[in-house]
Image (cartoon, grey):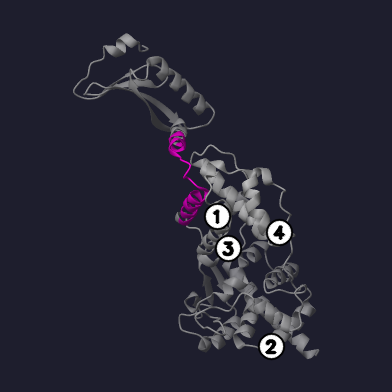
Amino acid sequence: MPLSDMKIRNLKPEEKPYKVSDQGGLYIAVQPHGSKLWRLKYRYKGREKTMSYGPYPLISLKEAREKRDRDKRLILDGQDPGVRKQMRKRAAVLSDEDTFAAFAAELLEKNRREGKASQTLKKKAWLIDQANEGVGHRPVKELRPADVFATVKPIEDAGKRETAGRVLSVIGEVCRYAIATGVDINDPTYALRGALQKKQVAHRAAILNPKRLGELLAAIDAYGGHIQTKLGAQLLAILHVRPGELRQAKWPEFNLEEYVWTVPRDRMKMRRDHRAPLPAQAIEILQRLRPLSQEDGYVLPGVADWKKPLSSNTFNNALRRMGFAKEEVSAHGFRSTFTTLATESGLWSIDAIERALSHEEENKTRRAYLRGDFWDERVRMAEWWANKLDELQLVATDGQ
């Protein structure tokens, strides 16, 4: 039967705690020392949970039932009342000292615990530093679209459109994190959609014509600059990895006996280890590079400092010195060259090509079932590609 005030007042403490039910999961727990506490038992997504409403008579029977009905409505709306209560508590203790910079630091630490790649964390920390210069000292509850715009507009005016867009994005991410923790604000970046100039998408230049590719390979082979640059460019063409992944490669990642290079996840865009088969041509180049560096050091050490890798502009600068304009080819463009010619050959599956490039399947359902790395096919494809490059270079050399 439902509780009444008289029945509640007549409840006597016993040696052990006990509870007396009202309706709809609401009950009162009587403690051995005599206190009477309101509780609500409910289920959310199949799990049994409990809410505390406070002591009787401070919380009356009528108030307890009102709280019960309020939380039951939340459950019907798909919300967990326990989580909502925690968020209200969090909001209640927020002060004006809870700055944007403080929440940004929390978000960065959360990303670190989630295992984000070190390079990703470094880039986000840099963007947060840019944001902090404008709004870091401001209480996050006080941030308005005009404050955010005043932070990113000077970056855009300095000609750094892409950076301005990324800073705007990270400010929004920090604000949404603050909202998730209980701060009662709206995301101020939402109102700024379209306020910055759109970034012009520029595809990385790549040579797709086989004849012209042969000429490029011949030019690389005849390059008279530093040997690390020449051999590195040849490896880049053969292995079609991202330039940064090759520049920062270290010898312990290579198993020359097994013809395998394993790129660790902290250097991969998709944040997972990537195995790349090494054709004989790549092995030969690596063996030539071996005496030029430390045993556990970089495969392509810097020219001025062997403790550092080749600089990020090394390959592109070399391509310019060979006479190839930036509109025609870039170091990253070898990936597009490989993708195009391997696809046009009709010899290889799209899945194997995508795995060779360490791309992630965009369709989530298909990705869940596509778990193999197509290794045997990729080994054959790597050998085919290296031989194809040799043939194109030979034709170009004979024609000179």
Q: Which residue is mark 1?
A: 132
Q: Quadrant of residue 47?
A: top left
Q: Is residue 132 above or below residue 188?
A: below
Question: What kind of residue is marked 3?
Answer: Lys
Give the mark nearest the N terminus, 2 or 3: 2
For mark 3, what is the residue?
A: 269
Residue 378 vertical position relative to residue 92 in the rendered view, above or below? below
Tell me the tag on residue 223: 2
**Badge 4: residue crowd in 10 Å (few <14, some 14–19, many ≥20):** few
**Is 157 in front, or is 24?**
157
Task: Specify few, some or many for label 1: CA neighbours under 10 Å numbering under 14, 14-19, or 20 or more.
Answer: many
Q: Residue at x 79, y 75 (%)?
A: 209
Q: Label 2 vs label 4: CA separation? A: 40 Å
Is disc 2 surrounded by few (<14), some (14 to 19) or many (20+) residues within 10 Å? some
Is residue 94 one of those drawn in magenta? Answer: yes
Q: Name the residue nearer the viewer: 113 or 148.
A: 148
Residue 384 is one of the magenta-drawn residues = no
Residue beneath label 4, please?
A: 157
The answer to whether residue 383 is seen in the rendering is no
Residue 280, given in percent of the width and then of the height, sits at 59, 82
Magenta residues, as a range? 87-112
**How many numbered discs?**
4
Query: As displayed, is residue 64 above or below residue 115?
Result: above
